[in-house]
Image (spheres, helix red, strand yellow):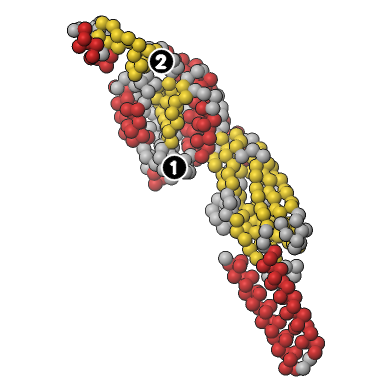
């Protein structure tokens, strides 16, 4: 707005100057001054008309060779400006908003600073003939997980003399999705064979009580949850359900986005990224081993106000769904992980193993995990770097570390 107001003030000063020249010529009866004033007035009129029409029928587009990339990968950003009219344009200035340059690196060209925090500007100057289109391509690298917004764009153009300038703001925003980094569990200091082996061993003892293939007489040691009361009434003695074996082990990953005990303390980026990378590594390893994997997180996607919930599945697309969601998820928890566990506990598939990934193992969370354990739910806790130790009798606890991961991330940012 300041720019537009300045240009209007300049136009007003020019009009005043032209008026003074004409007035002086008339008062002094100087034909030369009148001629100059008339010429300037004619030029100004042409400039006004040119400036108003110059901004018309301009089309600006941006696109990516691939709008979804993995951490550290490079794609190309293409920006295109088309002049869809007979009037040629001597100059068109385009300022396109760019994400944080530490998160999306521009590998060729320079970015200017924006008045918005953590935003930058990709500036281009074009000269276009009638019905001409110009395309420029820029290599960009995803150095940070996220759902990165490009735009809006501001377009300025005007007459040949620069007397009058018109401005157009195109609100279109395009997004580049950068998936979290995928690493083996061993890179995070987690014993993959031990962890997944334990989960499979526990699974072999589980049955799906919701799917019954028959009944049999009760024997000492059977759980009361297995009693089939209708069959018992018909037979006159206790009968228990014969459940169908679970076809694939269910692994439910609960991801905690909190990086400090209290929300007002903000976000610790390294802890957050390590927790997300750990959840991805666990899901990837489990899917490769034939697990059915679901993901729950106490944060929401941009278009939703509900916590993230991806039902268990083991299709080839399940990892892509998880990566896409964790790339777009916000950085702030919408509720505590303890509250999320309590809300989802009743709907969890029977026999599924719950793995909690957190860097803030609060007392409330510990109590929630022990409660799940008492209900017969297999539970595992993974502490991201920075999480303090916690005593959880009967619950395996592992610690994920990521100093090497973050060192490599820094090299990519500076590369």
Would you call the spot at circle 1 few (<14 residues within 10 Å), some (14-19), or many (20 or more)? few
The residue tagged 1 is 304
Image location (x, y in percent) of residue 120: 60, 52
Tell me if I can see residue 102 in this picture. Answer: no
- Left/right of residue 65 with respect to residue 218 in the rendered view: right
Mark 1 → mark 2, Cα distance in angstroms: 33 Å
* Looking at the image, residue 144 lies above or below residue 9: above
Query: CB atoms at circles 1 and 2 under 8 Å apart?
Result: no
The one nearer the camera, 287 or 167, is 167
Image location (x, y in percent) of residue 280: 51, 29
* Looking at the image, residue 221 lies above or below residue 276: above
Q: Secondary structure at mark 1?
A: loop
Q: Secondary structure at mark 2?
A: loop
The image quadrant where one finds the C terminus is: top right
The image quadrant where one finds the N terminus is: bottom right
Would you call the spot at circle 2 few (<14 residues within 10 Å), some (14-19), or many (20 or more)? some
Image location (x, y in percent) of residue 158: 70, 66
The residue tagged 2 is 246
The one nearer the camera, 107 or 94, is 94
The one nearer the camera, 385 or 123, is 123
Q: Earlier in the sequence, mark 1 or mark 2?
A: 2
Residue in the picture at 23% in, 14% down:
230
- Left/right of residue 353 with respect to residue 175 in the rendered view: left
* Looking at the image, residue 275 lies above or below residue 291: below
Residue in the picture at 39% in, 41% down:
334
């Amino acid at each position: 707005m300041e720019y537009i107001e300045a240009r209007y003030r300049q136009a007003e000063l020019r009009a005043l100057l032209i008026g003074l020249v004409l007035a002086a010529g008339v008062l002094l009866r100087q034909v030369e001054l009148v001629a100059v004033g008339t010429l300037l007035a004619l030029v100004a009129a042409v400039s006004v008309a040119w400036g108003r029409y110059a901004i018309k029928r301009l089309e600006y587009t941006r696109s990516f060779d691939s709008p979804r990339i993995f951490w550290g990968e490079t794609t190309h950003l293409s920006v295109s400006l088309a002049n869809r009219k007979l009037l040629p344009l001597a100059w068109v200035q385009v300022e396109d908003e760019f994400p944080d340059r530490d998160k999306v690196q521009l590998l060729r060209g320079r970015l200017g600073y924006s008045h918005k925090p953590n935003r930058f500007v990709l500036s281009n100057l074009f000269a276009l003939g009638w019905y001409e289109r110009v395309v420029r391509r820029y290599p960009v690298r995803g150095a940070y997980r996220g759902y990165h917004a490009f735009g809006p764009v501001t377009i300025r153009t005007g007459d040949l003399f620069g007397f009058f300038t018109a401005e157009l703001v195109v609100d279109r925003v395009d997004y580049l999705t950068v998936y979290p980094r995928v690493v083996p569990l061993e890179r995070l200091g987690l014993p993959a064979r031990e962890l997944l082996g334990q989960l499979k061993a526990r699974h072999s003892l589980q049955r799906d009580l919701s799917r019954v293939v028959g009944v049999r007489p009760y024997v000492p040691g059977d759980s009361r949850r297995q009693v089939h009361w209708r069959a018992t009434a018909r037979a006159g003695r206790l009968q228990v359900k014969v459940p169908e074996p679970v076809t694939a082990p269910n692994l439910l990953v609960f991801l905690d986005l909190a990086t400090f005990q209290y929300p007002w303390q903000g976000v610790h980026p390294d802890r957050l990224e390590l927790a997300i990378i750990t959840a991805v590594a666990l899901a990837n390893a489990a899917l490769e081993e034939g697990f059915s994997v679901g993901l729950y997180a106490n944060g929401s996607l941009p278009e939703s106000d509900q916590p993230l919930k991806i039902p268990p599945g083991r299709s080839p697309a399940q990892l892509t769904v998880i990566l896409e969601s964790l790339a777009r998820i916000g950085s702030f928890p919408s509720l505590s992980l303890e509250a999320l566990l309590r809300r989802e506990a009743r709907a969890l598939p029977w026999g599924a193993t719950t793995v909690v990934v957190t860097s803030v193992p609060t007392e409330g969370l510990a109590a929630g995990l022990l409660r799940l354990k008492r209900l017969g739910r297999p539970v595992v806790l993974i502490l991201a770097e920075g999480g303090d130790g916690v005593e959880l009798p009967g619950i395996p606890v592992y610690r994920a570390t990521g100093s090497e991961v973050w060192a490599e991330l820094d090299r990519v940012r500076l590369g």
